[in-house]
Amino acid sequence: MKKLLLLLPLALALVSAKAQVYTITDEGGNNVANGSTYNIELTDENTNNTQHWTLHSTVSDDIVFQVMSTTAVSGTQNFNCVGAHCYSPNDMAAHTENLDAGNTASLSLEYKPSGHTDPAVIEIKIHKVGDENESITFYLSYTVLTAGVGEVSKQNNLIAYPNPANQNVSISYNVKEASEIIFYNIVGEQVKKVEVNAGSNQLEIETSSLPAGTYFYSMISDSKITATKRLVIKH
């Protein structure tokens, strides 16, 4: 009886444990972790970027595939294809797709900045039909670094140190007019804004209240983004 009692918790754990239904591999054959983010830098605001993955499933059930833009950048386009089906630009509807005979499906997404340099985050979610608990989600975070922006960044001397930051970050800058620095989280939400005066200066910004992760900070002058850079916060 004692042996049965000792084995009972193990048996219950094995019964309750659920195997992961979906895995996704990138072009290099690496697994994409659920909730992970691909940080992609584009050197030209008119250069398109295409990413490819393969979805592997332990079941033969149909999947629901959805692309969502968590930061709306007006004028940009994203095109997604699942298997043999490709959809119209910026289609964010949920589509039911069939897996092939090997319970896999090819996935691809092409992003076109179309002359825009604002940061953009695209969310990709895949789940079982009728069961969103069996799902995998990951993100593509795009930053466009054009030659023009690079030149302005040098003029602005927009530099954050240390990067990664912990409790505080120092940002140096050089602007000709009163401007502001705006911080965005990975899904494009504004988390902090700092007013800066014209001239060359350095300011200390508290970051201890921000969760660890990847952020973007932009210099805004005359209602225009003149530079955007990435900041990593680790606690």
Image: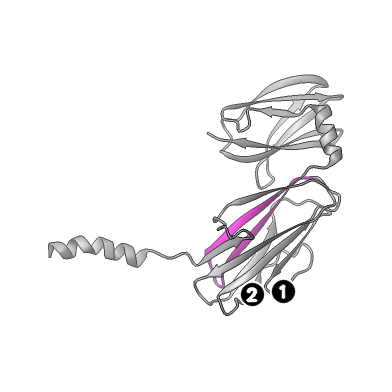
Residue 64 at x, y = what percent? 61, 70
Residue ID for mark 2 = 97
Residue name at image x 18 percent, y 62 percent? 5
Residue 223 at x, y = what percent? 85, 36
Residue ID for mark 1 = 85
Q: Amino acid at mark 2?
A: Glu
Q: Residues within 10 Å of mark 2 (few under 14, many from 20)?
A: some
Q: In the rendered view of the protein, which quadrant contains the N terminus?
A: bottom left
Q: Amino acid at mark 1?
A: His
Q: Secondary structure at mark 2?
A: strand
Q: Quadrant of residue 205?
A: top right
Q: Quadrant of residue 119?
A: top right
Q: CA distance from mark 2 to mark 1?
A: 9 Å
Q: Is residue 127 magenta?
A: yes
Q: Secondary structure at mark 1?
A: strand
Q: What segment is highlighted magenta in the picture? A: 118-141
